[in-house]
Image (cartoon, rainbow, N blue to C red):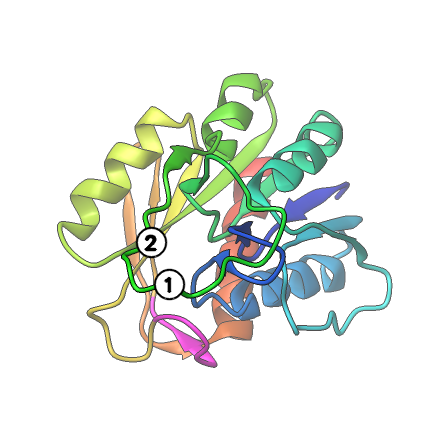
Amino acid sequence: MSKRYWLPPTYEAIDPVRFIGNHSSGKMGFAIADQLTKLGADVTLVSGPSAQKSKQASVQRIDVTSAAEMLEACLVHFKDANACVMSAAVADYTPKEVAQQKIKKADNNLNIELKQTVDILSTLGAQKKNGQVLVGFALETNDEEKNAIKKLQMKNLDFIVLNSLNDDGAGFKKDTNKITIIDKALHKTVFPVKTKDEVALDICNKIIELLK
């Protein structure tokens, strides 16, 4: 197997001190990168800010901070990838203007105008070539399956990994996850709660199945 790419969260700067972010730790993505490496893949991992470390020394790590930096790195490497796993918790919005100095506390309310970030998964889906496998993730809180299928179809994915914050054992910063894999034919495979290493192997096995 040749290159696969994978990603955690992004931070969108408000000023030199503060940012917009989310609770993603990157544990799931690092587990996927490690499993792919163990299976013989040449892995490039594009990582947002994360304290996680790869267990496999051969993983090539590229550190980024913002959604824009992540997009740039993905565009450089995607064209040579056999498969791309996009588990990143990328910010959907970023401040329209970033203050050059720390914003001081004032009596009045603070309003920050936001603009949409470029949708990385949609961008890659539009560039996907025959034979490439593109995997997306959907972390949902309601209408889980409906929202995941919509994302799968709109972004030209080969399959999507759905997890819900309503499921025990799933969500941010945990060592376990509970997923459902839905492919282009809308075939659905529901897995029980497993460790993230075990979940990563299930995802990798699906990728291998599609590449054969």
46 lies left or right of 87: right
115 lies left or right of 142: right
10 lies left or right of 59: left
For residue 186, say whether it is visible.
Answer: no
Q: Are marks 1 and 2 in contact (CB under 8 Å)?
A: yes
Res. 75 image quadrant:
top right
Query: Is 143 located above or below residue 57 in the figure?
Result: above
For residue 112, say whether it is visible.
Answer: yes
Specify the quadrant that holds the N terminus.
Answer: top right
- Mark linked to residue 51: none
Give the dominant element type of the magenta stretch: helix, strand or loop: loop
Report which residue position mark 1 lands on.
Answer: 106
The amino acid beneath tag 1 is Ala
The amino acid beneath tag 2 is Leu
Report which residue position mark 2 lands on.
Answer: 110
Query: Is 99 located above or below residue 25 in the figure?
Result: above
Q: How far apart are marks 1 and 2 (CA)?
A: 8 Å
Nearest to the observer: residue 9 or residue 167? 9
Q: Where is residue 114 in the image (x, y as percent from the top left)?
A: 38, 38
Q: Position of residue 199 (x, y in %)?
A: 47, 67
Query: Is 122 located above or below residue 4 in the figure?
Result: above
Image: magenta residue range: 171-178
Task: State the SS at label 1.
Answer: loop
Seen at 27% across and 48% down, the residue is: 188
Q: Where is residue 212 in the image (x, y as percent from the top left)?
A: 61, 37
Q: Residue furthest left?
A: 143
Task: State the SS at label 2.
Answer: loop
Which is in the foreground here, disc 1 or disc 2?
A: 1
